[in-house]
Amino acid sequence: MKEITEELAKVLIPEPARGEDESDHDYRARVASACEARNALVGELMMAAGASATEDPVLARLVELAAQKREIQRQIRLIMAYAREFVRPEPYRLRALAEAAGMSISTIRTVYDTDDKIAVATRIGRKDVKNTVHPVVGDQWWRLPARSTTGDADPLPVTDGTRRSRVAARALYT
């Protein structure tokens, strides 16, 4: 396992390329910095592998990165919802958001949903510009749709044909 973690660290943090005008001292400093970063990553990978069910550093790192990716995607959805639905006097232009996010204009239109708008409204404490969603106050969470989750009991029907959960709704809005 040690060999795998060391090689994975080399894959993720490669040896730096020497710059044309770079002095020996600067290059050695960058190499030493990369070596320190790799050693730190090896330690992190070993700990993550020990904490995972499979004790595999590659799979453990992929699980970590997948969780980070989901969090980044959630943040992008919330930012898009805010930029399109809450900014006054007018929303950000689709083209500007698409360029900034590296997405197509059509993706920007559909990347967020009502749940994301409700989450933004609740966090900033005001309704959207079109007055379609309002912030959640107190114990209103039970009336709101939430993202579909697996394993939750007590599902709530929603008009779009999916089923939601009170547990998921509370987790999303509290």
Image (spheres, helix red, strand yellow):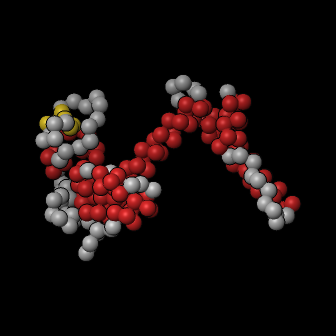
Residue 174 visible in the shown view: no
The residue nearer to you, when weighing 36 against 103, is 103
Query: Which residue sits furthest right?
Result: 24
Image point (44%, 62%), residue name = 100
Quadrant in which the N terminus is drawn: top right
Image point (42%, 44%), residue name = 70
The residue nearer to you, when weighing 46 against 18, is 18
Residue 70 visible in the shown view: yes
Q: x%, y% of residue 67?
A: 45, 41
Q: x%, y% of residue 48?
A: 57, 35
Image-based side of 31 in relation to 143, left or right: right
Q: x%, y% of residue 97?
A: 38, 62
Image point (17%, 47%), residue name = 144
Q: Quadrant of residue 150?
A: top left
Q: x%, y% of residue 3?
A: 72, 30
Q: Quadrant of residue 19?
A: bottom right
Image point (76%, 53%), residue name = 17
Image-based side of 2 in relation to 124, left or right: right
Q: Does residue 159 sit above or below 82 in this rendering?
A: above
The residue nearer to you, when weighing 19 against 148, is 19
Q: Quadrant of residue 161?
A: top left
Image-based side of 14 in relation to 123, left or right: right
Query: Which residue sits furthest bottom?
Result: 89
How many numbered marks are there?
0
